[in-house]
Image: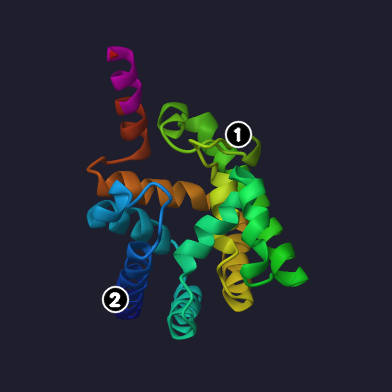
Amino acid sequence: MNMNKELIKQNKELIKQIVAMEWTMFQNVSNHGGRASCQDDPKTFEIMRSSQWVTWPEEALASYLEDLKKAFQDGRNLVTEKYARMMQSTAPLEFAQFKDQLPPLSQEMIRLIDDIVTIHLSWEEELMTIYPHLCKRGRPVYAGEDSPYATSIETYLRGELGTYSQKTLHLYYQHILKEKAEGINGSKCLLENTVKRYGFKSLEEANENVKLSSMEK
C-alpha cells in the first residue's frame, strides 16, 4: 500500500511538471486570428491535460517529460508542432507549405502512431455506443469528419503522437496494449477522469445530464 501511495505521489509530481511545461508552450502558440480565448483559461487546460496524463504509467510520463525538456533546450514548441501536424488533415494546402520544417518521423514512429490510433478509435467507437449524448458534445471521431471548425479525435491524436519521441511512443504503445489485453478502455478512463473533475460522479451521470440539457433546448 505504501508503495502504491509513493507511486501515485511520483506520478502527480511528473504530471504537475508536464502540465506546467505544456502550458508555457501553449502560451507561445501563435494564431492567425490573434490570441485564442483558451490560452487565458489555465484551469480548463489543467483539467484536460492532467486527465489524460493520470492514465499514463510512470515510465512513459518520465519519458515524455524528457521530450518536453529537450524540446525547450532545442528551442522547439511541441504544442505548436502538434497543431501544425493536425493541419495535414484540416488544412492540407497550408500544411504543404511548411511540412518540411517539422521534425521527420521515422518509419517505426509512423507504424507506432498508426497502431496506437487504431486502438484508440476502437475505444472511441465503444464510447459512442455507451455514452452517445456525452460523446456528441466532444470532437468527431474520424479524420474524414474534419472541417475548418472541428478537428477530429483521430487528427488531434495523430498530431500529438507526432510530437513524442520514439521512446515515448513505444512506452505508450506497450501501455495501451496491456490495457487492451486486460479489457480496459483507455479512452473511457480519460473521459471518466475529465467528467469527475467537472463534478460528475460517473460517466453515466454526465451522459444523462447532457441528454436532459439537450431535451430542454
- The residue beneath circle 2 is 9
* Left or right position of 161 against 54: right
Q: Nearer the viewer, residue 148 or 207?
A: 148
Residue 61 x %, y %: 45, 74
Residue 202 x %, y %: 32, 40
Q: How many marks?
A: 2
Pointer 2 local density, CA inside 10 Å: few below 14, some 14–19, many at least 20: few
Pick the quarter of the image with the N terminus: bottom left
Asked if residue 56 can be seen in this view, the reply is no
Element under label 1? helix
**Magenta stretch in the rendered image:** 210-216
Q: Main secondary structure of the magenta part?
A: helix
Pick the quarter of the image with the C terminus: top left
Element under label 2? helix
> Which residue sits at x=31%, y=80%?
6
Examine the image and state in which quarter residue 16 appears: bottom left
- The residue beneath circle 1 is 145
